Image (spheres, rainbow, N blue to C red):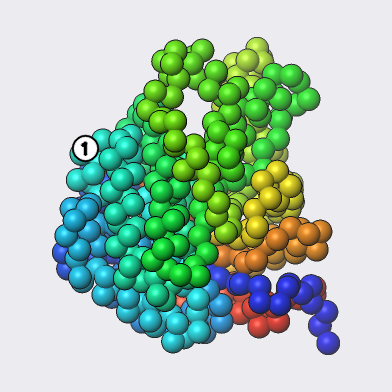
Amino acid sequence: MTETRSFPKNFIWGAATASYQIEGAWDADGKSESIWDRFSHTSGNILHGHTGDVACDHYHLWRSDIQLMQEIGLKAYRFSISWPRLLPDGRGQVNQAGIDFYSRLVDALLEAGITPFATLYHWDLLQVLQDQGGWTERSTAEAFVEYTDVVTRYLGDRVKNWMTHNEPSVAAYLGYWWGNHAPGVKSRQASIQAIHHLLLSHGWAVPVIRQNSPGAEVGIVINISHTEPASPSQADAEAVRRMDGMWRRWLLDPLYGRGYPTDLLEDEIREGTLPAEGLFFVKEEDCQAISTPTDFLGLNYYTRHVVRSQDVPESENLPATVIPPPINENDYTEMGWEVYPRGLYYQLQRFALEYHPPKIYIAENGASYSDGPGADGRVHDARRIRYLKEHFAAAQQAIQEGVPLAGYFVWSLMDNFEWAYGFTQRFGLIWVDYETRQRILKDSALWYQQVIRENGLPVSG
Ligand code: IFM
C-alpha cells in the first residue's frame, strides 16, 4: 500500500478562479463596464493587447466546467461574482440575468456535491463607480454594502462560505499607486485611501452577510509572501519592516483590532505621502467596523521576497527585491516567482500565532508554467505537480503543528486571463485553448484527483 501523508478528515480541497479572468461575456445580458474592461480596452495596458472580453468563455461553458471539477473530485470551488453583472449602475436596479447566472451556477455546484465559496470582490469594480473616484471614496464602500446585500439575499440560502475581498492590497497598490492594474491610477495617497475603503466595506459587509445567509462563514483573503532581508544589515531589516508592513501589517492589524500601525503611518507623513494630520479620511468608528470578527482568514501564497534596502550605498538604484540565485531550473515559475514552499509553512505558523484566526484557508496557491498538449494530446506539467506537492507538504506540516488550516484552493482551476500579463501566463489545472475554448485536464489535475481521493499526499507519488 502506498503510504500517504494524510490531511484532517473533511479537509476542503478546492480550486479557485475569478470572474474577470474566466467569464468573458463582458457586455452580455445587461452587464455594464468594469474598470478591467476599460483598462484592457485601452492600448498599452495589457501584454499583446489581450482583453478578458471572451477569456475562457466560462459564462457560456460553466456547465461543462462543473463536470470537469467533478472529474477532478473537487470538494469546493472558489469563484468571484461580477458586481457589474448584478448591479449595472453599481447600486439600485438589479440585473436579473446576472442573478440567474450565479444562481444556476450555485445550484449546479451543489448538485455536483461541490461546495461554493463565493468572493464578492476580485477587482472588477464598475467603471461608473470609478468615475466617481472608485475605492478612494467612502461612497464606494457604501455601494459595496448594497451590492453585498443583493448578492446574499439572492444566494445566501445556498452559499454558506463568503469571502468579501480578494487581496485588497493588490487592488489598492497595483490599481491606485503603481497603475499597472485597473483603474491605472498612480498616487500613493490614493492607494492608502483605497485600502481603507476596501477594508471598511469588508467590515460593513460582514453583518449583512450574516443576516442574509444564516449559518454562513465569512472571511477576507489577503496575499502574503515570505519576506526576508537580503543581509543581516540594519538597513535591510528596516527594508523588511517597510515591505512586510505594507503587505501584511497595514491590513491585518486593523482587521484584527490593532488599528493602522503607527510606525508606518509616521513614515508616510514624514515622506509627505500623507498630510500632517495623517489619515484624514478615516472616521473614529471605522477601525471598530473593520475589525468585526470573522470566521476565517483566507491567505494567498505564491513565493518569497528577499528584500534589500535602497539605503545601502552600494545597492543604490537596485530593485528593492533580490532574486536569489537559482539552484536548478525548477526554482522559478514562469512568472519569475521563486518556488519556496518552506515560506508557506513559516507564514501559516506566523499568521496563526500573531492573529489567532479561528480558521485559515489557503485561498490561492499555484504556479504558472506554459506546458501545453504534447503529441499524445496530454499536458505533462510535471513542474506544477512538484510545486503543489511541496506546498501541500508544507501545509500538512503546519496542520500537524496545530495551525487551524481547514482547506486549500489551488490557483487556478483553469488557465485564464492573468491581468497585465494577458493570456501569457498559465496557472491552470485545466489547459485552455484560447482559440477553440477546448479544455484538457493537465497531469496536475489528475494528480490532484488522487490527492483528493486519498485525502493525502502520496509519499512516493
Ligand atoms: O491571477 C492572480 C489572482 O487573480 C490573484 N492572486 C494571484 C494570482 C496569480 O497572479
Residue 88 versus residue 384: which sits nearer the camera? 88
Residue 343: percent from the left, percent from the top?
Answer: 71, 48
Q: Is residue 141 left or right of residue 352?
A: left
Considering only vertical position in the picture, is 299 above or below 247? below
Residue at the spot 34% in from the left edge and 44% down from the top edge: 141
Residue at the spot 57% in from the left edge and 59% down from the top edge: 295
Question: How many residues crowd around disc 1 within 10 Å: few (fewer than 14), some, or many (20 or more)?
Answer: few
On the image, numbered disc 1 is attached to which residue?
A: 132
Q: Is residue 400 left or right of residue 122?
A: right
Residue at the spot 53% in from the left edge and 22% down from the top edge: 265
Q: Is residue 151 left or right of residue 272?
A: left
Residue at the spot 60% in from the left edge and 22% down from the top edge: 263
Amino acid carrying mark 1 in the image? Gln
Residue 121, located in which quarter of the rendered image? bottom left
Residue 17, located in which quarter of the rendered image? bottom left
Residue 405 versus residue 226: which sits nearer the camera? 405
Considering only vertical position in the picture, is 108 above or below 408? below
Residue 76: percent from the left, percent from the top?
Answer: 53, 74
Residue 283 seen in render: yes
